[in-house]
Amino acid sequence: MPVQVQGVVARSQGAPVTLETIVVPDPGPGEARVRPLACGVCHTDLHYREGAINDDFPFLLGHEAAGIVESVGPDVTDVAPGDYVILNWRAVCGTCRACLRGRPWYCFSSHNATQKMTLLDGTELSPALGIGAFAEMTLVAAGQCTKVDPAAPPEVAGLLGCGVMAGLGAALNTGNVGRGDTVAVIGCGGVGDAAIAGARLAGARVIVAVDIDDRKLELARKFGATHVVNSRQTDAVEAIREATDGFGADVVIEAIGRPDTYEQAFFARDLAGTVVLVGVPSPDMRLDLPLIEYFGRGGALKSSWYGDCLPSRDFPMLIDLYLQDRLPLQDFVSETIGIGDVEAAFDKMHHGDVLRSVVVFDR
Ligand SMILES: NC(=O)c1ccc[n+]([C@@H]2O[C@H](COP(=O)([O-])OP(=O)(O)OC[C@H]3O[C@@H](n4cnc5c(N)ncnc54)[C@H](O)[C@@H]3O)[C@@H](O)[C@H]2O)c1
Ligand SMILES: [Zn+2]
Ligand SMILES: [Zn+2]
């Protein structure tokens, strides 16, 4: 039977989100219906509601969640009702050209549910990143459910569903940070701090955190920054060079999504260094950079979708590290809130008051 539940919907560009009754169909072939237990508020949700991702309003927001599988479609064997899962937005298809070449973390044809969730009047919803987990129930592709150890509480585990995984993976997978490397991270929100935590895990020797908010820089230290730079007061490129023996960093991670901060990243890398863009730009943004500087320095300019993660490989491993006190995922949770508080959480994010507000559902 389809169920009716409450969900957080962005109806039109820039308008505050509203709590609406949504209809969630029974899972069909290849689908699973999941009861989210917790879902973090990611900056990408705000990008959706601002119309910066696409125009497919209305959106059902929320995409950084852990929950319990409630029911599955007829042919689903990988997950079963009762499983504790993190929802992922890279449900590897196995048949696209990336998957066939053995590079499933780039999967170009990730699965989502085939059926649509709707508003009561039948209007189809676009679930954010194919998930839509600011809702008491959601419908996803079964491959979007990654089983993990239930010992990790949902408000912590769910973070791996998007921003924290994106940041960790930007350092560990895309940037391939290694022991002894120097790293700079520009923008220290949830994503940037996760990149800092990832760089520390990998054994980076210098980790420079850059932000315009001293509160964020204080937190960045906690996650492993060895140097902090307030780029309102200090030139970011100069400061990164100074912290890296005058050379620039081996890996510079941009975790905001702006041309000016990308430019800082570009000029703050060492010869043969790597820039990783994990912040999401809006479609109108442009770059104007000297091509000779790109050529002359060698190295690589990369972007990172979801930290190039492979959920089945990375989520259980990172949850293990958390449970062994080697990855402080709990420190990303600034507050837990109710499903009606998402708009207020956007405000707090906008003002830099939080790393992550996490919606927790009644159990
Ligand atoms: N690539 C991916 O797969 C992926 C996944 C999740 C999120 N993201 C993106 O990552 C970005 C960061 O997300 P978040 O949730 O951490 O956001 P956030 O708003 O919590 O963090 C942004 C940080 O950047 C800082 N900042 C803003 N302007 C700055 C400037 N000019 N110079 C230096 N610092 C500045 C802010 O003070 C804040 O600390 C967003 O663009 C989000 O959409 C990407
Ligand atoms: Zn694929
Ligand atoms: Zn996200």
Image (spheres, helix red, strand yellow):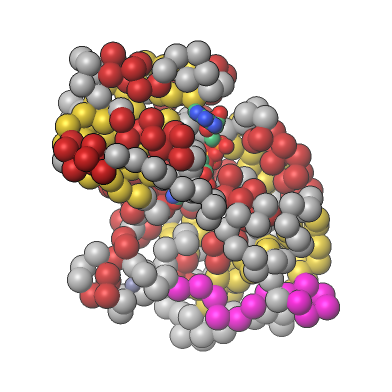
Residue range of the region highlighted in magenta in the rendering: 111-123
Q: Is residue 76 above or below residue 299?
A: below
Quadrant housing residue 140 = bottom right
- From the viewer's perspective, tell me whether residue 260 is left or right of residue 106: right
Q: Is residue 256 above or below residue 87?
A: above
Quadrant housing residue 61 = bottom right
**Residue 157 spot, x, y in % from top left:** 50, 46
- From the viewer's perspective, tell me whether residue 293 is left or right of residue 33: left
**Residue 105 spot, x, y in % from top left:** 31, 60
- From the viewer's perspective, tell me whether residue 136 is left or right of residue 166: right
Q: Is residue 260 magenta?
A: no
**Rendered residue at 76%/77% (across/down):** 123
Q: Is residue 94 visible?
A: yes
Q: Is residue 215 above or below residue 64?
A: above
Q: Is residue 348 above or below residue 15?
A: above
**Rendered residue at 18%/36% (across/down):** 297
**Residue 144 spot, x, y in % from top left:** 47, 66
Q: Nearer the viewer, residue 239 or 188?
A: 239
Q: Is residue 69 visible?
A: no
- From the viewer's perspective, tell me whether residue 180 is left or right of residue 337: left
The main secondary structure of the magenta stretch is loop
Q: Nearer the viewer, residue 228 or 122?
A: 228
